[in-house]
Amino acid sequence: MEYSNVTLLPGSPQPFGATLTAEGINFAVYSSGAAKVELCLFDASGEHELARIPLPERSENVWHGFLPTPHGVAGVIYGFRAYGPFDATYGLRYNGAKLSLDPYARALAGHFTWNDGLLGSTVTADASMPETWNSVDSAPFNMKARVIDTAFDWGEDRPPAIPWRDTVIYEAHVKGFTKLHPRVAEPERGTYLGLANPDVVAYLKHLGITAIELLPVQAFVPERFLSAKGLVNYWGYNSLAWFAPAPQYAIADPVAEFKTMVKALHAAGIEVILDVVFNHTAEGNESGPTLSLRGLDNASYYKLEPTNLRHYVNRSGTGNTIGIEHAATRQLIIDCLKYWVEEMHVDGFRFDLAAVLGRESGRFRTDAAFFKAVAAEASLRYVKLIAEPWDIGPDGYQLGHFPPQWAEWNDLYRDTMRGFWRSNPGILGNFAERFAGSSDLFRSTGRRPTASINYVACHDGFTLYDATAYDEKHNEANLEDNRDGHNHNLSWNCGIEGPTEDGQVIELRERQVRNLLATVLLSQGVPMLQAGDEFGRTQRGNNNAYCQDNEISWIDWDLAGRRSWLTTFVRQLLTLRQRAPGLRRDTFLKGARQVDREHKDVSWRHPLGHELTASDWHDQNARAIGVLIGQAFTDPHGTPNGHLLFLCNTSDQPVDFKLPEPVTNAVWQIVFDTARWRANDLGNRIAAGENCVVAAHSCVLLADGDAPLSVRSGFSLN
């Protein structure tokens, strides 16, 4: 399309971004210190700049203009250039030679290529020397925005609206989940449409999860140091455009294909939660590229060092930190969240390094302006909000301190349960606190067990199987001489490091996997599984596979077939959880008598049969504990009844547990035994007062006579 002699009309300062109407396109962009902002228009490929037209109006700090039809139509590709003072010592980095991507871009066009032309300035090794303004045009190397028509046939799509207490989260990567899936057509593997595949959706539904939490799908680019090594940012925590779905996961139309994925998952009753990165951007520190926010209003969008505005506060570990205290930045993020909910129909968000969002004057506040802004938005009031409750700044660890509307990744749960099952000493009290819902973290502010997202493995760290197969990380493929990644993994290789043909070691590892899975799915709180852990996926000991877009990270569906028995175990655990309201309470387990005065909600049992005493809790040599969960079920009339007894032995020797007396039926029946999973006598009865032998490094679940028959009959391989 030709843009010669095109004149922009004044337009409106709201809404931000490019808004398509029947009469044309309204453009509005925030830039408080610019003297001029140009709208730059490109050809259909996004490679050739065709016109630069100054935005004709400024309303306070918003520049705006209206491109009428026939030029202002869907498909227009554009960017902005902001002209103004360049003085890094004052945090001012305006440079009209740099094309800035619209922060509100809904879709991207063109290609991203690392080149020095992306740099807004040249930083010398001598910090006392001023930065040199870079006059190279960055447009050939940066992405552009594409104006889209948002129309989509949602049909009868509705949010599944799963209550927190019934939620089971499944963390997955869009590409990695289906890249090797045999029932997904080759063109759709690793894409949004791959996740919408009926066989994939059916697998998730049959497994029993209720929400899929996707690693970042906001458009992102690789870091320069990774590109130089021939690697990529696979996870996606290097955001470029918060509103735009990552184009690498689409075949043709990222927006429509993302919506198709959401619609398919919703039809199966599965919620979609996005892992969002609002703590930093891909622009890095003062040596980084000018791609979007830096070129439009560096001092407003970023947190700068107060004693030297040339430098960036770095609470993210990536070079910069978003300036959440500025109203324009908060509005950008709130508008983005609303867009993903209202237009893209997502059901919730997991906020990466969320402590950044609660900082004001450097300190974290539960009542921070951002949290208040989220709570004030009607469309965000009922979506799921999950915090990764830390950043790398001072006082950055804020687990338990987020507002009541929020849930939080509970890494203390992960560390406690891994430590418990590797037989760490003196951990019984911590085990009980985490199993019961982590009331020490959440109860004082009126929150519920569902504020705790319980997990034993996630994308960041060892897979669940690798936590039983490796004592040390093996990140050599990341080309950083194995220096990256955590060293504190609380893992145990069961006697041999890495792959082995030793049958006893293999059996022990598989038992440990079952132990950890059983624990997380029987605990109070919201369980989260990492994709592939339900069949023992491995990353070959890599605990930081953020740059591995290959078989290290992709789900091995052949392995799923070979370990289908483990997937069956997980599915049956999730079925049990769904049938047992006592495993997903809205109140913490605290050892209190229930309404009938006969049952406690939980009783912590010694192998000799008595409730744990103060000395038992502090016994550094204790390696076994029983958890008696009262009134775990309800009868057909809704009356609570039935007990579950969870017996855990982390020692190297079998332990005899004396079984307590059930109130109404004097027998217990084995539901599962992680040491005898393939046995055919599960469901056998053991009389009260008799002993149940729990093998070394294993757990047993029993149900009393009031539990449903489908539970008492035991798990099976069917």
Image (cartoon, rainbow, N blue to C red):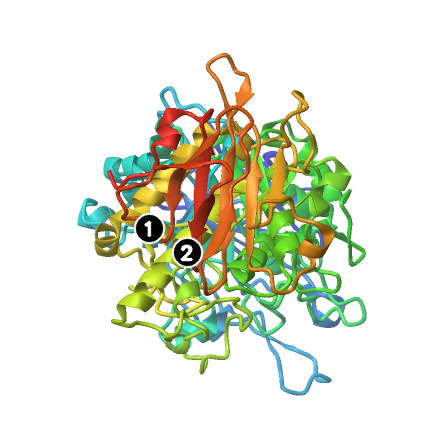
Helix, strand or loop under label 1: loop
Q: Residue 169: where, in percent of width, then height?
A: 46, 42
Q: What's the residue at 61%, 60% (across, down)?
A: 294
As drawn, 265 above or below 250: above
Quadrant in which the C terminus appears: top left
Query: Residue 426's quadrant in the figure?
Result: bottom right
Q: What's the residue at 44%, 52% (across, down)?
A: 694
Q: Residue 507: where, in percent of width, then height?
A: 32, 61
Answer yes or no: is residue 546 visible: no
Q: From the viewer's perspective, is 19 left or right of 387? A: left
Q: Which mark is residue 661?
A: none
Q: Residue furthest bottom?
A: 126
Helix, strand or loop under label 2: loop
Please name the amino acid that badge 1 sits on: Arg
Answer yes or no: is residue 283 visible: yes
Q: Residue furthest top?
A: 637
As drawn, 506 above or below 606: below
Asked if disc 2 and disc 1 are in contact, CB closer than 8 Å, the reply is: yes
Dot 2 or dot 1: first in sequence order is 1
Give how far apart the Cα atoms at labels 2 and 1 are. Answer: 9 Å
How busy is the neighbourhood of tag 1: few (under 14 within 10 Å), some, or many (20 plus)?
some
Please name the amino acid that badge 2 sits on: Ala
How busy is the neighbourhood of tag 2: few (under 14 within 10 Å), some, or many (20 plus)?
many
Q: How many marks?
A: 2
Q: From the viewer's perspective, is 434 left or right of 230? A: right
* Residue where numbered disc 2 is placed: 695
Quadrant in which the N terminus appears: top left
Query: Residue 419's quadrant in the figure?
Result: bottom right
* Residue where numbered disc 1 is placed: 676
Q: Residue 510: where, in percent of width, then height?
A: 35, 58
As drawn, 73 above or below 537: above
